[in-house]
Image: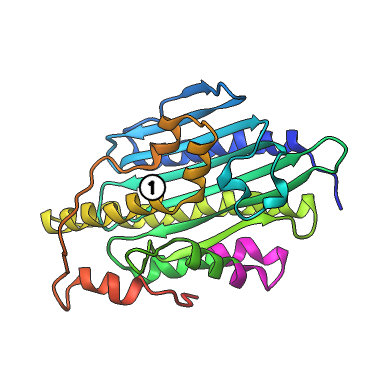
Amino acid sequence: MSTPDFTAVETWLRGLQQRLCERFEAIDGQARFGRDEWQRAEGGGGVSRVMADGAVFERGGVGFSLVHGTRLPPSATAHRPELQGRSWRAMGVSVVMHPRNPHAPTSHCNVRLFLAEKPGEEPVWWFGGGFDLTPYYGHDEDCRDWHRAARDACAPAGDHVYPKLKQWCDEYFFLKHRNEPRGIGGIFYDDWSEGGFDAGFALMQRVGDAYGAAYADIVERRKDQAYGERERQWQLLRRGRYVEFNLVWDRGTLFGLQSGGRTESILMSMPPQVRWEYDQHPEPGSPEAALLERYLKPRDWI
């Protein structure tokens, strides 16, 4: 098994944050990412980059964090109880972009490395991450391109990896209380050490790079598409589902809050405007109904 090189991962993650900010600023043409460096009292810190009120992006966040602690929080040991009592280190980049145009989807990407340590024992490490797409109006071309990018990022790791990570994503980004997916999926993985450290790091790099390229292409395609108040109100309503998932089901959000993370950075993924309606249902045969009936159904888009 290859030897872990945490410095190399940190260097690459910091570079990924910068490249994504530059790419999205170029698409927007107006807004710029601020820079907010922070320290965590329990250990470590990070850099939060947030864009707001742009011509294309209503809000976007690209955060880097490198944090550590003496005891793993409950969200980290729920699936790995044997790790209780270990100290830990975690580093990663997390991205959420909320475009202004309802035809341009929200996107999320996360790539991370986790290490749990105990004196006298071998360190336990794993990679995690992936990316998923949350459209408000369905477009087959976008869905196909998104999943092709996901498949190609996984391909060097083996033919079995994309189907496995796609299913993992479909199952993870699911609102159980609504009985519906958050979006059209993508790929998701956690506790990943298959092939050794170098292979895991290479997968992280391909996932991060594929996300930026694939999402940029979709936003460029949709950012100038015509829309009105009807589409805007639907977008705000569906954004509510995004908020519900992050606050109720997302393990990353829970880990950040339970481990004493910086609340502003953890919640920078929230959209700036959202609405909820009681027992709302789209008009039968409408584009809004098509989103629920055709696009928010796990399927093979390739």
- The residue nearer to you, when weighing 257 against 210, is 257
Q: Is 281 located above or below residue 275 in the figure?
A: below
Q: Could you say where residue 97 lies in the image, as x and y percent from the top left?
A: 39, 45
Please, what is the dominant secondary structure of the magenta stretch? helix
Q: Indicate the position of residue 164 as horizontal and vertical percent values.
A: 61, 70
Picture coordinates of residue 238 (x, y %)?
26, 57
Instruction: Give the camera-side residue of 96 and 178.
Output: 178
Instruction: From the viewer's perspective, tell me whether residue 173 is left or right of residue 289.
Output: right
Report which residue position mark 1 lands on: 247
- Find residue 135 and report its image quarter: bottom left
Where does residue 79 sit, x and y in percent of width and height? 62, 55
Tell me the residue at 44%/32% (across/down): 265
What segment carries the magenta color?
149-164
Count how many numbered circles sit on residues in the image: 1
Drawn side of residue 295 relative to residue 263, left or right: left
Q: Does the rendering let one see residue 212?
A: no
Judging depth in this view, the residue of 249 and 214 nearest the camera is 249
Q: Residue at x 88, y 37 (%)?
A: 120
Q: Is residue 16 left or right of residue 98?
A: right
Task: Please name the residue shown 48% across and 77% down the image.
Answer: 300
Q: Examine the structure image and report whether residue 159 is included in the region drawn in magenta.
A: yes
Is residue 246 in the magenta section?
no
Residue type at mark 1: give it: Leu
Q: Residues within 10 Å of mark 1 (few under 14, many from 20)?
A: some
Q: Quadrant for residue 290, please give it.
A: bottom left
Could you tell whether 38 is left or right of 280 in the image? right
Query: Does residue 170 appear anywhere in the picture?
Result: yes
* Helix, strand or loop status at disc 1: helix
